[in-house]
Amino acid sequence: MSYFLPESHPVLTAARGLALAHSGMIEVNSAPLYLRARDPHPDRTVALVSGGGSGHEPLHTGLLGRGGLDAVCPGEIFASPHNRQIYEASAAAAKSGGVLLIIKNYTGDVINFQIAAERLRHDGIPVATVLVDDDLATDSADSATGRRGTAATVVVEKLLGAAADRGATLEELAELGRRVVAASRSIAVAARAQTSPTTVSPAFTLEAGTLDYGVGIHGERGTRTIARPAVGDLVRRMTDDLLDALPEGPDDVLALVNGLGATTELELHAIGVLLGDELTARGLRPVFTVPGTFTAALDMAGFSLTVTRLEEGWAELWTAPTRTPLVLPRPTLTPERSAEPEPAVSPADTSPPPAPHANGDRALLDRYALTVSQVRDNLTNLDQLVGDGDFGDNLAGGVRRAVKLADERGVDGTTALAHAFLDDVGGTSGPLFGLLFQHLASAAPKDGGAPTAAALAEAAEAGFAAIHRVGGANPGDCTLVDALAPAARSLADSAREEAPEAPLTEAAQAAIRGALATAELRPRRGRASYVGDHALGVPDPGALAVALLFMALADVHEPATAPRLPAPGYITVP
């Protein structure tokens, strides 16, 4: 985030950019800085004004316009706006029924908004305030400041904006705002701090495998640091805390899943499903589940959950139309649960594979599954250096699918691998591995014994030929064939001998050498080719996975001479 902020007047420049992107909707006053809606609803008699530190976008400015706010006062990054900004914005936006100030419960915001309110009253402008204090992490009897104002501000501003467009009075809006705040609670977690605009480094550090629980939207540390649980367990814990703190009320709720700046839509939508399931299991009805980034903390990697109990009529206010930069999801009904069955094996499943079977081909599958489970994270880390970082999970997920297929249908190990990777594993490497497994399956003896060097050589060469036809890769291109081709050659050489001593061990060693040598190659194929010289020094993850396969073959059929498993330390991040 902060790498690309303008050196001077970043907040003003961003405000001008928002107005430019939404021509005719927003006007910017530069001294003092505030933004005002150009086209408020004609039935509105009370102006809604809010604001706060910058870095929380799209909070406040995203809800500027019909169905939202009349004026927004942005402060500097994570700093309250000055009372003059609030006062002049309110005076400019005021309507016949006065002005309602929506304030997040942070000390600077409260002081400056209250001073502005005093100035407005002195001028004879009717004014009221709504204080948003939804963050249960700071709900402590030892604190005089009380709960912070966080993502529930979005819910408050949306509902009040719809009510104001219907002509609600200042008193009615203030009372509605207080009820919405009272019916809302939020909690946030983070796995990585936001980037400090000053140092261009994370504002704080977390040890690997931990989360900060109860972080604030200004990048404040959490109230405690916890070991990172599975995301389902985390959402369950957050839901328990929210409902313990939420006052009694209607069972209909709005569930807001808010990203803190660096959390992807993919993650937020998945968390939304988990939250909806947790609420439903507790007898609540999530009428709206709303995932998205609404109240950021610059580029913090984390999310918050907000639950609001919906009184009668509030659902209609949420679905009322808006004309604002931020378009909030407005479903008319709770989305039905997907009828699509859950995948047979989750990619996040880390349960150990079953013990090896006596059948050699099945023993190969089990040995390979064990090895891949042990090095998955390392393969992923390598792939992050040269690709998109999904290789370790894709490989491990495909192998787990194969194990399940072999267990449930009784198919051979390599046949199960072929079906799993060809049918279920996406990306580039998954189907290519499927082609290799498909040809290797033909080399497995029906009696479960050791495949001959000749049969394996033919199968490996056929697999290489198929992969070359599909992807065009040749040895030297820094792909999986850099391990496959030398292994196939080694097997072919062994097949020509009358009594090869350890053909699978020699093939595995050839595959290892080929995989290691990819670290010296400039990639010509695959995703790694996009990063150019940045890939130098990094062995290709696909080639390493092929080497692991031949090591597993040798370990099952030639245990006395095979390279030892689990894989040696060459599968490390440089």
Image (spheres, rainbow, N blue to C red):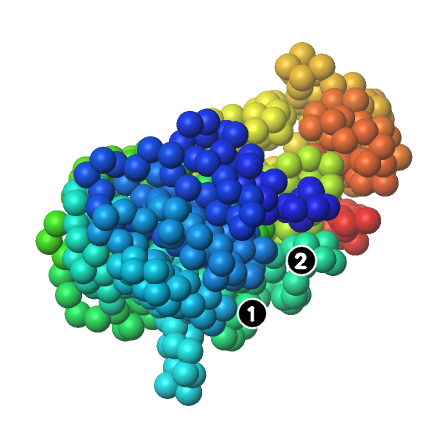
Residue displayed at 73% across by 36% down: 386
Q: Residue furthest top?
A: 469
Q: Is residue 47 left or right of residue 228?
A: left
Residue at label 1? 221
Contact, mark 1 vs mark 2 (Cβ under 8 Å)? no
Residue at label 2? 196
Q: Is residue 317 above or below residue 327?
A: below
Q: Specify which label sits upstream in the sequence, 1 or 2.
A: 2
- Which label sits in the foreground, 1 or 2? 2
- Asked whether residue 234 appears in the rendered view, the answer is no
Query: Could you tell me the amino acid type at mark 1?
Result: Arg
- Asked whether residue 7 appears in the rendered view, the answer is yes
Query: Could you tell me the amino acid type at mark 2?
Result: Ser
Q: Residue furthest bottom?
A: 142
On the image, the x and y values in percent for residue 93 come to: 35, 46
On the image, the x and y values in percent for residue 57 come to: 49, 47
Answer with the quarter of the image where residue 333 lies.
top left
On the image, the x and y values in percent for residue 36 come to: 41, 41
**Of 220 and 561, the residue lying toward us:** 220
Answer with the quarter of the image where residue 527 lies.
top right
Residue displayed at 77% across by 31% down: 531
Helix, strand or loop status at disc 1: loop
